Amino acid sequence: MADDMSGHPPSGPGHALERLIFFSDAVFAIAITLLVIEIHVPELHDGHFSDLDFIAELAQLTPNFIGFFTSFFVIGAFWAGHHRAFDCARHWNPRLIWPNLMMLSAIAAMPFFTAFSSKYYGHRVPVALYCSWLLLTALLNIRVVALVTAPAIAGEEMTPARRWAIRQRGIGVALGAATAVVVSLFAPPFGQPAIMSIPFWMLLLRRIGPRG
Amino acid sequence: MADDMSGHPPSGPGHALERLIFFSDAVFAIAITLLVIEIHVPELHDGHFSDLDFIAELAQLTPNFIGFFTSFFVIGAFWAGHHRAFDCARHWNPRLIWPNLMMLSAIAAMPFFTAFSSKYYGHRVPVALYCSWLLLTALLNIRVVALVTAPAIAGEEMTPARRWAIRQRGIGVALGAATAVVVSLFAPPFGQPAIMSIPFWMLLLRRIGPRG
Amino acid sequence: MADDMSGHPPSGPGHALERLIFFSDAVFAIAITLLVIEIHVPELHDGHFSDLDFIAELAQLTPNFIGFFTSFFVIGAFWAGHHRAFDCARHWNPRLIWPNLMMLSAIAAMPFFTAFSSKYYGHRVPVALYCSWLLLTALLNIRVVALVTAPAIAGEEMTPARRWAIRQRGIGVALGAATAVVVSLFAPPFGQPAIMSIPFWMLLLRRIGPRG
Amino acid sequence: MADDMSGHPPSGPGHALERLIFFSDAVFAIAITLLVIEIHVPELHDGHFSDLDFIAELAQLTPNFIGFFTSFFVIGAFWAGHHRAFDCARHWNPRLIWPNLMMLSAIAAMPFFTAFSSKYYGHRVPVALYCSWLLLTALLNIRVVALVTAPAIAGEEMTPARRWAIRQRGIGVALGAATAVVVSLFAPPFGQPAIMSIPFWMLLLRRIGPRG
């Protein structure tokens, strides 16, 4: 697919990059799809099968659905950022392997933290843990993005403006996660909603950052 | 793979499109295969291990198998439609990412709705919820297909007739799902079978639609 | 990857074939890896943590491990056959989609039948069901292989000898599965071991079949 | 993607190799991501929802998290080694299929051994079993790497020095796993930490091995 990406012989460096991207995509896709198996089908008992009984049981799953969709879009955002960053990669470097695996291990653990914070919705420890894990993932991601957008991998055609545009998205996610950690410690039920500050931080960074 | 799809430099726009397709395929494949883990092995008790005991226990799993195969072919149909639509894509556009992720989140949640409606087979709320979720998925899918078949992404060689042929399949799925929602409210046990009206709607649309 | 496989324009027919292969590989890989989650970690109780207690508990998992490895290599054999058959495909045909999805739905259900026959090891109904499901999968697979190796998809360069060589493997799997079904009805504990007759049937077919 | 890898016609040998790599990547990615579903969300009871209660429950999951990260990086290391070895592959050979499937079956079973040794952390049998399984995986991996780096598959341009560099990593993993087996028999709690001797063995092999 990318055999000729960097002018190297077929199945050489370009192909190695391709396989790393492929493996990462598979881990993102599995983690995002496994989220649903943490939502358990409610147990109703004989004689309590009216429409209202079902609706009452489903209402109790609300935190689980909020958790599912929050994590789906958080993991989706990390995938989109990974996609955007690796789209610039032109050279293979084995030093990418371990930082990328570390970031993927944080993504792969997300279903646990999602299930934990959904089950004990609004309690300080589970919410703060979820937000802290998101912050850790964001920091590991910043490191991967920094490597991929550096001249050694991204190649010469990468302008400083484009590099900054890609990196600032990763920094915006980390700032949003840090905001959510702080909020979750003082007002647990507002911790996860505070993740929605991510676009605000991205906008702010775009305003104050250097331009191309 | 598709580096040269749109005449752009290697690993540019064509490759970005490729990776989106790849990620979507992985989510479809995982959701479709996870369906089976919601079918639990029956628990028989010592002294009740005759052939008839086993057959009686298996008979109780009938709704689960109907649910498994229904969802397998529903998700398979969405995959086939996605395949057909993206086969026309020639240009990359980052605006595809979020509508596609939203559609995938609906697909990824299907194993839950399948398990819920299989466990309480024929009850109004679980069946109507399954059919409504299918309708939501179909609507999110229509949006993705509309984007992919629009000139900005599909390119110039796409004829209006082919565009309509692809889009009408998505509309047919939505009409079939809407039929199933209505049926499930009034006659729950016939809700899921009403999904089989999809080919009828597709045929109808093919008759009334414009021709190439 | 295969854009130029059949001399068609990029991202046309060759690419559609590629995506079908990719999706199939993902389903095979997920079904094969999900097998392990049906092996549950044994529950030991306080005061019973000696080496012998652990070994006794593990010994009880023997049928589960036999089931895991049997199904791993059965699914692996179907994957290898799919790989061998599609390696000859040169033209895309949308008629491949549904027969392939039907075969994949049989593969995706294997973890359930594996878990069921492992839990009730040696009982007639679970063993015969496992072997019958294998037979059904083999028959659906024969249909896919027949389509892929037919001139419309495999192209002109496919010799009758090579076509027969590929198809006879699929027939050998079906004959081995049929043998296992018969054995399982009369001597349940020998049903799954009878799957090992597959290579014998393949050898026999190679002897009696036409040669290139 | 690799159609022209070895100068063969499109979709021939190069493509067959590609599909084997792809399937392996998917199995690695699923096994690595399934590890998390063995970490169960703790069950707290009404009236015991203080911050300290949550922290106490999480503290009990420490072995599960150690197990998750150990196996994540062990499977990640096998993936990285597979990546490095297949990066040299230039020719397709069907004899690769079964040794590769055997190695993948060992990888796919890792989530079970991880969950078992995490649940009974520090007990001899579960720890020794985990380390022995790792050793078995390492031996099966050595066989795959030997096949892939042999002249029949790797092609002429592979130097003996590079072949040895790739193979010695696999041998280093096996020596580290063997060390862990021995340690786990005599001092179970130190069995899994002894896996960290892998880089030491790799370094030693690099010192004593032939040079390019």
Image (tube, coloured by chain):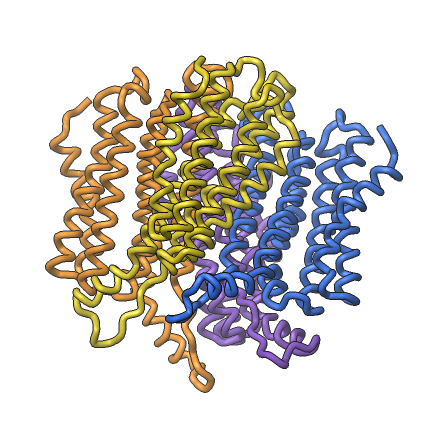
Chain colours: A orange, B purple, C blue, D yellow
In depth, the one of A33 and B48 nearer the eye is: B48
Where, quadrant-wise, is the C terminus of chain C in this rendering? top right
The residue under the point 40% across, 76% down is A54
Residue at image point 34% right, 52% down: D189
Q: Is residue B161 visible?
A: no
Residue A15 image position (x, y, % from top left) = 46, 25
- Rendered position, B23 above or below B15: below
Image spot of residue D200 (x, y percent): 35, 31
Quadrant including the N terminus of chain C: top right
Please say whether residue D152 is visible from this viewpoint: yes
Q: Position of residue C105 (x, y in %)?
A: 61, 54
Which quarter of the picture shows residue B137? bottom left
C8 over C93 or under it: above or below? above
Task: Locate residue C117: give its quadrant.
Answer: bottom right
Total tally of numbered discs in the picture: 0
Q: Name the side, left or right, on which B47 lies relative to B187.
A: right
Q: Is residue D106 above or below residue A97?
A: below
Looking at this view, is A83 or D78 the one in front? D78
- Taking the image as shown, residue A107 lies to the left or right of residue C40, namely left
Residue at the spot 47% in from the left edge and 20% down from the top edge: A12
State whether residue B200 is above or below residue A10.
Answer: below
Task: Please state the horizontal and vertical placement of residue D33, each as a whole percent of the image.
Answer: 41, 48
At a point 53% along the width and 45% down the height, the residue shown is D106
